[in-house]
Amino acid sequence: MTQKHPPVNQDATALASDIRHLIAEAKAGLAATVNSALTLLYWRIGQRIRTEVLKRERAGYGEQIVVSLARHLEAEHGRGFGMKNLRHMLRFAEVFEAEEIVYALSRQLSWTHLRCLIYIDDPLKREFYLEMCRSEGWSTRTLQGRLDSMLFERTALSRKPDALLVTELTALREQGEMSPALILKDPYILDFLDLRDRYLEKDLEDAILRELENFLLELGSGFSFIARQKRLQIDNDDFYIDLLFYNRRLKRLVAIELKLGEFKAADKGQMELYLRWLAKHEQEPGEAPPLGIILCTGKNRERIELLELDQSGIHVAEYLTGLPPRQLLEQKLHEAVARSRARLENRSGADEEGAV
């Protein structure tokens, strides 16, 4: 009995698919190698210029040498080595002084990523964006969007003392551990919902579900949608959580309540009830306790401080349905960061005095 063989064309099609995959892998590997080599080259050029400038110790010498050097290099190697890019390279070497650090970065981030990061003056803020790029695989477009929306200043992490900020960034870099402070924000910017000046809570909820993809991006890393108006039965009463999510990075459920007005103390009791029900009936083994986010149009900071919401796993944040002018948003966020840090420092000082 003669054995039937598959048609030649079918063999060729399968073989072509395998070879295309090999070619794509090789191209990706080559692109990564080229990016790494170029990034190291740019750093070495910047370092060489920096060494020359420091050696001379003359005011204005750095600008003169960059202008002169750019003229020579651009004529020989093209616009990639013009005056603007040489300044980027010099800044790169000033920000990252150790070659081994640059080598590690060059294997994970593109030169375009690094060019955005080197002009962030605050080292901890720069470290935050760098680690988030590495951890979350942000494109340069995503990174620029996060910078424009002042993501760092809106995170709970930015309100913490520098020492704690360093600890949490180190845990992200070395163990890949994402803490709630890296994800939770205040305010949340929901300008993509396109709401009119007057709307109901249901309108807000409907708009969020229509724009769920954008809402998930604004929430941050690792969120997935579970339910709208999640029903809880307690005794003979029914309660409903506006929106329920799961965060795979935090390994915990996240309940979100939407409020049209300012935060009220009663909102805490309502959310605590929801979180305890979720912990009892929905939390799986190995998961962390559920978190609650109360989104409101305003809040009294002293009231929130007195209620000690952090200890209950509750985060209260404002939401903005329109993006304010950047200068106004920046001022508001910097004031909030300063107040939070001062409050934490005062609490720490009081604890130390009590210990003595």
Image (cartoon, rainbow, N blue to C red):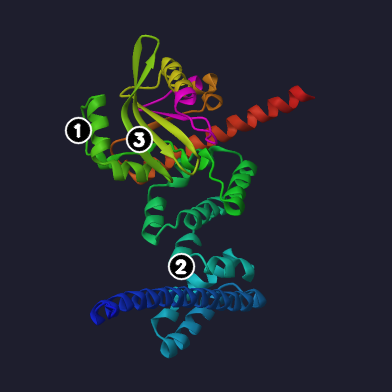
Residue 8 falls left or right of residue 92: left
SS assignment at label 3: strand
Q: Does the stretch in magenta take in 284? A: yes
Residue shown at 28%/39% (left/top)?
322
User: Extreme bottom residue here?
Assistant: 76
Three-letter amino acid code of the residue under disc 3? Ile
Judge whether 166 appears above or below 208 on screen. Answer: below
Residue shown at 37%/73% (left/top)?
21
Three-letter amino acid code of the residue under disc 1? Arg
Question: Which mark is first along the chain, 3 or 1?
Answer: 1
Judge whether 35 appears above or below 279 on screen. Answer: below
Residue under circle 2? Answer: 110
Q: Position of residue 117 (x, y in %)?
A: 48, 60
SS assignment at label 1: loop
Residue under circle 1? Answer: 196
Of tags 3 and 2, which is closer to the observer? 3
Three-letter amino acid code of the residue under disc 2? Ser
Q: How many angstroms separate mark 2 from mark 1 (CA)? A: 41 Å
Work out whether residue 279 or residue 16 is closer to the camera in this orientation and state it. Answer: 16
Q: How many angstroms separate mark 1 from mark 3 (CA)? A: 27 Å
Q: Residues within 10 Å of mark 2 (few under 14, many from 20)?
A: some
Q: Are marks 1 and 3 in contact (CB under 8 Å)?
A: no
Q: Does the stretch in magenta take in 31? A: no
Residue under circle 3? Answer: 226
Work out whether residue 134 or residue 274 is closer to the camera in this orientation and state it. Answer: 274
Q: Residues within 10 Å of mark 3 (few under 14, many from 20)?
A: few
Q: Quarter of the image for the N terminus: give it.
A: bottom left
Work out whether residue 71 or residue 355 is closer to the camera in this orientation and state it. Answer: 355
Question: Which mark is first along the chain, 1 or 2?
Answer: 2
